[in-house]
Structures are given as C-alpha cells and as structure tokens.
Image (cartoon, grey):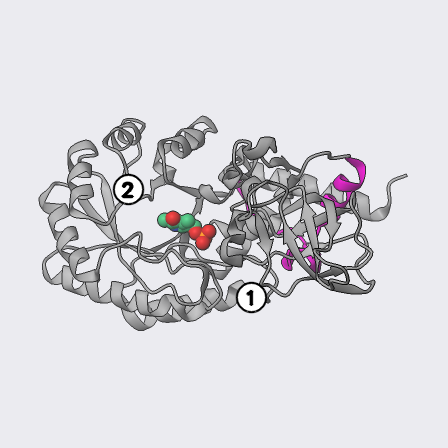
Amino acid sequence: MRSARAKRQIVGDRMQQAARRRGIALVPPQPQAVAQGEVTAKVARYLAETPLADPTLVIDLDVVEHAYLSLQRALPLTKIYYAIKANPAPEVIRRLAPLGCLFDTASQGEIDLCLKLGVAPDRIGYGNTIKKRSEIAHAFAKGVRLFAFDSQAELEKLAELAPGSQVFCRILVDCAGADWPLSKKFGCTPRLGVELLTRARELGLDPAGISFHVGSQQTDPTSWEPAIATAAEMTRTLAERGIEVRLLNIGGGFPSRYRSEVPPLEAYGKAIMESMKRHFGGRMPEIIVEPGRQIVGDAGVIQAEVVLVSEKDIGDEKRWVYLDIGKFSGLAETIDEAIKYRIRTPHDGGPTGPVVLAGPSCDSVDTLYEKTDLRLPLALQPGDKVLILSTGAYTSAYSSVGFNGFPPLKTVCI
Ligand SMILES: *Cc1c(COP(=O)(O)O)cnc(C)c1O
C-alpha cells in the first residue's frame, strides 16, 4: 500500500513531467529542508537503500530544478546561463535544458558536452577570457556566437577566428564579501574595457556587452552595486561613441548554504534590481546571470566514511578524524578552509569534542579543517558513515583521477 504522501508525490511528479513536456515551469512544493540544503527525503531513502563502498556525491535533481526556478523568480528579467564547471554531470544539464536554461562554458570539452546532450549552440556562451586559437575556431565552427574577452590579444583572436560574433568584455571588480574570491585573474580595468569594446566594432565584431563576477559564494547582496555603477558609466561613455552595448552579464556568486547562514535569494534579486534601476534608469540592458554554485550546491550530499579517529598525545582533547575523502577526491574548496561544509554523523545530538578533520591521502595538505572550530560527536567511530552537506558544486569535477590510488568522487543523480 502506498501512503497518501507517496501518492501525492507520484501525482506531483506526473504533473511536473507533463508541464515540462509543454514547456511550462512549475515550482514544485518544497519541504523546508530543501531550502536550507538539508538531506531531502529522496536522498535519505536512496542512501538507506544503497550500500556505497566509496565516497559518493548524490545529487537530487529536483533540488537543482528548484534552485533554477528560485533564481528565475528572484531575478525574473534575466537570462540564466548555468556555469557548468560547477557540476558538469550530464543529468544536471539534461534537467536544466528543458526549463529554458542556457549554458556558460569555459572549454572545448564543456561546449562539446552541451552539444552532445542536444543543447543548441545559440544557447551556449563561451565565458572563459583565455582561449586557445584552436578552441575559438572549434566553438565557432560548432555555431557558438557569444564570447568573453578581457584583453586586446584575445579580441584580435576572436576577430580572426570568430568573425562577426557577439563579444562581451569582462571587467575587474572588487570581490570583497566572497568566500571564494576570483580576484585579479580575469577582467581588465573599465577604461581599457571601453577602448577594447570600441576596437571590437572596428574589428567587425559585435560589441554586445560588459561582464563581471563579484566572487564565488558571495555573501553580501550589495556587492553587485559598485560593479553595476561602473558598467553603467562605461555604457554611457560607449554610447557617446555611437556604440550601444545591450547586455550586462553580472556573473555568478549566488551562494550555497554552508556553515554560516546566507541571505535569501530574494535579497540578491532586490539589491541587484535596485542597483540596475539606480544606474541605468529607463535604459535597462538585457541582464545575464551565470550561476554555478547556487544551482547545484545545495542539491548534493556526499556520503563518506570515517577511517580513523586518533589522538596525537596522551590526554589530547582534540582528536584527529580521518575520512575516506579529502582535498584530492573532491573537497578542494577546503583550501585555506575557505568553504566550511556542514557534516552530519550517526551520533548527532550526543556530546561533542573538537576535531581536526583530514583526508586519507599521504600528503599533509590533505587536511580539511584545522583552524576552523569544528566539533564532532565523541562517539564517532571508524566505519561510521558521515554526510557532507551542500556539496553539489565544485567537488566531483575537482576530484583528481586517483592520487594515492583513491578513486575519483563518484556522482549519482536521482
Ligand atoms: C565560475 C564562473 C561562474 C560561476 O560562479 P559561481 O560563483 O559558482 O556562481 C560564472 N561565470 C564565470 C565566468 C565563471 O568563471
């Protein structure tokens, strides 16, 4: 006998499928747990029924869809390009594509992956400002017509190998407030950007717009404000030269839920749209967002196993807990303890003590949290399964091919 709840779920799933076939986006009813990046009932059921020997990332595709629809609702006037580097699982792309999602790519491999999954080339943007000539030529041959750049040399490559394409110039912005800043690697100064967009038209390209990224896991919704102000000023200067840029790509940066609370997406939508109105007034450009982390982060849970719990000295209060997953098998964002994941154990609720958390490999950098104040149950034992929450973004793709013979992080999408 199916419970009433299970029946409602089935009816709900069928409505979703029917709506999706008709191209209608329905917002599924979500239990409170989903919004906070907790383990969903579906994932809990899967983990209970499936013995997993190696660390495994389980992605709940319903949460991916919910995250996409939530962003669409928070920023209704924007076009959403999912930055597939955050999690390139084909199932994620297949789930997002019918919802109308577009895709931000950074390499030939990511472009080919999208194309193989049936994404049309006019729904793909090539957002990396650093591309080989062969990669530009490949993308252009496949029909991609939207490219990022941040330098004169890249612009000239684009003019030659992707003639007539739409190009947008990435500018340097302040990443304060971001737990994973993208700092100085990408972007040029606004004044160089104005010159380069002017040059783009002379080279026969379409100077479509301006882009920036305020840093990943950006916890301050007002961080977009100075960059939007700068972009508006550039847009006015360019208009005086007869160049009408019509796209503003405000990047990604929308957060997942790690140890600290983050503002709700609505706060981001509100702050961004207020900045847009303040600086662009009635002459609003088309807005593009490129979320990565926000789309997949909270949708993923890694199940890992405790390998050892030990002390370094007699009477040490601080225990060392070693897991079968570490920096080389998916948890690279623990570098500098930047991203602080929440961890669930079978003993939650019992007494806890301070720990250092480390991975299994024979490299001392494979220590996850040493400075971070992390406490885990005193009852924690080797063999216990632990859950690392909100790990859908920047984990599986960062996993090494097999350092020390540990297998790369497996992904299961359900
Ligand atoms: C990584 C990246 C993104 C995604 O950033 P998130 O912080 O994960 O949202 C978007 N755009 C570009 C160009 C990127 O490099």
In this rendering, position of residue 319 left or right of residue 213: right
Corner quadrant of residue 109: top left
Circle 1 is placed at which residue position? 262
Q: Is residue 281 visible?
A: no
Q: Residue at x 61, y 62 (%)?
A: 259
Give x and y (percent) for residue 172. 28, 59
In this rendering, position of residue 294 left or right of residue 290: right
Amino acid at pointer 1: Val
- Image quadrant containing the N terminus: top right
Name of the residue lying farthest toward the front: 314
Where are the magenta residues, as a range?
Answer: 22-50
Circle 2 is placed at which residue position? 130
Front: mark 1 or 2:
2
Measured along the vertical axis of the image, is residue 100 above or below residue 373? above
Q: Is residue 91 visible?
A: yes
Calculate the distance from the C-alpha at mark 1 to the C-alpha at mark 2.
Answer: 32 Å
Magenta stretch holds residue 9? no
Q: Secondary structure at mark 2?
A: loop
Magenta stretch holds residue 31? yes
Name of the residue lying farthest toward the bottom: 278
- Image quadrant containing the C terminus: top right
Give x and y (percent) for residue 122. 34, 36
